[in-house]
Amino acid sequence: MVKVSNRQKPHGKVSSFKNTNYQFDIAADKMNLDESMRVLLKTPFREVTVQIPVRLDDGRLVVFLGYRVQHNGARGPQKGGIRYHPDVDLDEVKALASLMTWKTALVDIPFGGAKGGVTCDPTQMSSLELERLTRKFISRISIVLGPYRDIPAPDLNTNAQVMAWIMDEYGAHYGHTPSIVTGKPLHLGGSKGREQATGRGVVFVIREAARDFKLDLKGATMAIQGFGNVGSNTALLAAEAGSKVLAISDVQGGIYSAKGLNVSKVLEHAKRQGSVGGYREADAISNEDLLELKCDILVPAALGGVITKLNADRIKARIVAEAANSPTTTSADEILNDRGIHVLPDILTNAGGVTVSYFEWVQNLQQFQWEENQVNSELEKIMVRAYVQVREVARKERVPLRTAAYMLAIRKVAEAEKLRGNEPLDPRISSTILQKRPIR
Ligand code: NAD
């Protein structure tokens, strides 16, 4: 095998895709992965950019940009969420798509990785505008979607309602196809337990890791950045498990209580007010201070790149559980590792969402519904199995959990590529023949 080390730490304005591939290369170096296999596994299979003209409620026509990146489909149909956010660009979508490839491989569900996004600010758009945007986006990328090709799901600022519009729009072109998208409302073929799945998976992984790090989840203190689908469900389930949630935040800021927050009450307040801010039985805290709070477990569950070399030295948690995708930059990751802070990597920690999306897809194809306890117990089995495998590789290879997770995932995708015929060196051709053959 050819030995390559082409790692160069991303610097300047950090590209999300370079960040992700930097983590890939750390694991690939450890595995002595062949150069051509690296290129095959790092390069996205397909990148689509579309213009999305949308008529706003006031009559103006605005042209948005939308992306769908299919990163790798060697292990099955490509799978990944759709994000609506002003910072979305092709680079970010490529990074998120590659994370999906490693995530689905790591938890061993038969999917590849994809991601989509639209550069827009959904907080400034009406529901009708969002519906028009979603329908136009889907009609323009539907040619590369399909239940056995590429299946979208919710992500930042998209929810079950958006998934319902996606199913409806796809169905208008290709006929009723519930298995085209996951994270749908229950009445349209959604799975019981999908809404809570990512948060539930986060808590399963934290529970297993806490036990290994001799930390009792019951009574453990926690700070959670982000109170959307992932953050709120993580908070609710962690509180149910007996943890003390000290702080919670959203895009507008955070709240803190040394006694611990009543998460259900905070959720009711946030639903009423549109934000956790102003909750009476707590003090205000900024998003920056929340990350640096003294607690046992820090859960970034909002945006990427929030733990950087500028604040990594001041993180005081014992465990950072990456519920968001890529919340830790590569430099920060090294600082946290050096400081002995355990980082539970995103491709493991937040894989519960795509796992139950897989269950939803299976139920749609079988036209059958599972009970919620079946969904939750199958999810638990998968998350615990994945955590144990990652921990074992980390111990055996003496690498951080993130590198171990990548190593496990890369091995599976590389094997699938080889079996499909993409062997870096065709074993039937000896290297001597290769050397003698003239290059044309
Ligand atoms: P969401 O839109 O439901 O919630 C996002 C939350 O983050 C909101 O509370 C929002 O106010 C907050 N937020 C936004 N910008 C912020 C900022 N600058 N500072 C602090 N908070 C901010 O999104 P979600 O589905 O919960 O996704 C959150 C993260 O989890 C994303 O990184 C996403 O990629 C990842 N993720 C989501 C799923 C899923 O199933 N939804 C699965 C895996 C990973």
Image (cartoon, grey):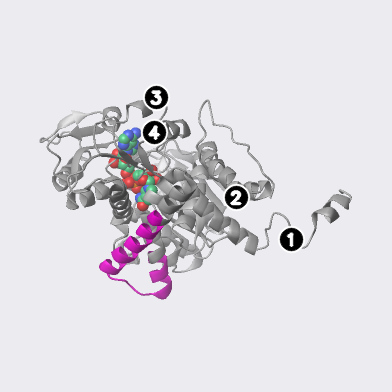
Residue at the image position 22 percent from the left and 52 percent from the top: 237
Q: Disc 1 marks which residue?
A: 427
Is the CB of the residue bearing disc 1 within 8 angstroms of ligand 1? Answer: no
* Numbered tag placed on residue 257 in the rendering: none
On the picture, is 26 further left or further right than 123?
Answer: right
Left or right: where does residue 95 sit relative to residue 160?
A: right
Disc number lying in front (2 or 1): 1
Q: Which residue, as the protein is rendered here, is positioned at the far left? A: 281
Q: Is residue 23 visible?
A: yes
- As drawn, the label of residue 310 is 3
Q: What is the CA distance from the residue labelled 2 to the residue labelled 1?
A: 20 Å
- Lower sequence index among marks 2 and 1: 2
Inter-mark Cα distance, 3 to 4 = 12 Å
The quadrant in which residue 384 appears is bottom left
Q: Are marks 3 and 2 in contact (CB under 8 Å)?
A: no
Pointer 2 or 4: first along the chain: 2
Q: Amino acid at mark 2?
A: Leu
Residue 376: say if magenta.
yes
Tell me which image quadrant ligand 1 sits in. top left
Q: Earlier in the sequence, mark 3 or mark 2?
A: 2
Mark 4, residue position? 336
**Label 1 crowd bin: few (<14), some (14–19), many (20+), radius 10 Å:** few
Q: Which residue is mark 2?
A: 41
